[in-house]
Image (tube, grey):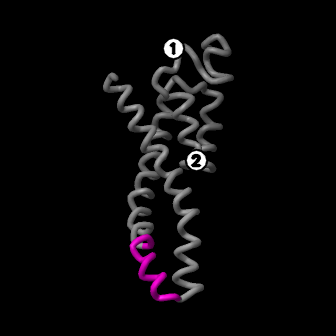
Amino acid sequence: MTRDRAGAWVLFALTLWPVIALALAIDLLPRVFAAFVLEGDVATQEALLPTAIAIVLGSIPTLLLIVGLTVYYTRRLTRTEDVPRDMRAAWGVAFVVGAFLVFPIYWWLYLRPGRPAGHAPPGGPAADGGR
């Protein structure tokens, strides 16, 4: 595995982490909220306290990662020839509206190692003769 290929997969893992963290938060937050606010059971609160702390402490680096990924993907979008010019505005809007949920799709379409040379997603440079 070449260095660029390994770096692309590391970027993919970093790109997927916020999506995984969101899924974990959607699963865990209602239970933690119910234990601390609704039930008031001290034993349950003490059992879930490490989970609550992990959620809070895990959120900070995840949010910083999302900011970093947004900067990286936006800079790459504006400086690459891989993305057709007529699609750049659409991807820019998708980055703002869909945020980190859109990044794995962009990575798969434009950064994935092993993507055939000259192959572009529908509507890309290969589809219009490379204009």
Picture coordinates of residue 42, whole percent (x, y): 46, 88
Relative to 24, residue 51 above or below:
below
Q: Quadrant of residue 59?
A: bottom left
Q: Quadrant of residue 3?
A: top left
Residue 10: percent from left, percent from top: 38, 37
Q: Amino acid at mark 2?
A: Leu
Q: Tag 1: residue type? A: Ala
Question: In the image, what residue occupies the spot 43% across and 41% down?
Answer: 13
What's the magenta region?
Answer: 41-52
User: Which element carries disc 1, helix, strand or loop?
Assistant: loop
Q: CA distance from mark 1 to mark 2?
A: 26 Å
Q: Which SS class for mark 2? A: helix
Task: Locate the C terminus by quadrant.
Answer: top right
Q: Position of residue 36 (x, y in %)?
A: 52, 83
Q: Residue furthest top?
A: 129
Asked whether 4 falls inside the magenta stretch, the response is: no
What's the residue at 51%, 23% (across, down)? 81
Instruction: Give the residue number, with chain letter if any, for mark 2.
Output: 101
Residue 26 in the image: x percent, y percent? 58, 62
Residue 117: image tag: 1
Task: Say which of 60 and 30 sits in front.
Answer: 30
Q: Quadrant of the N terminus?
A: top left
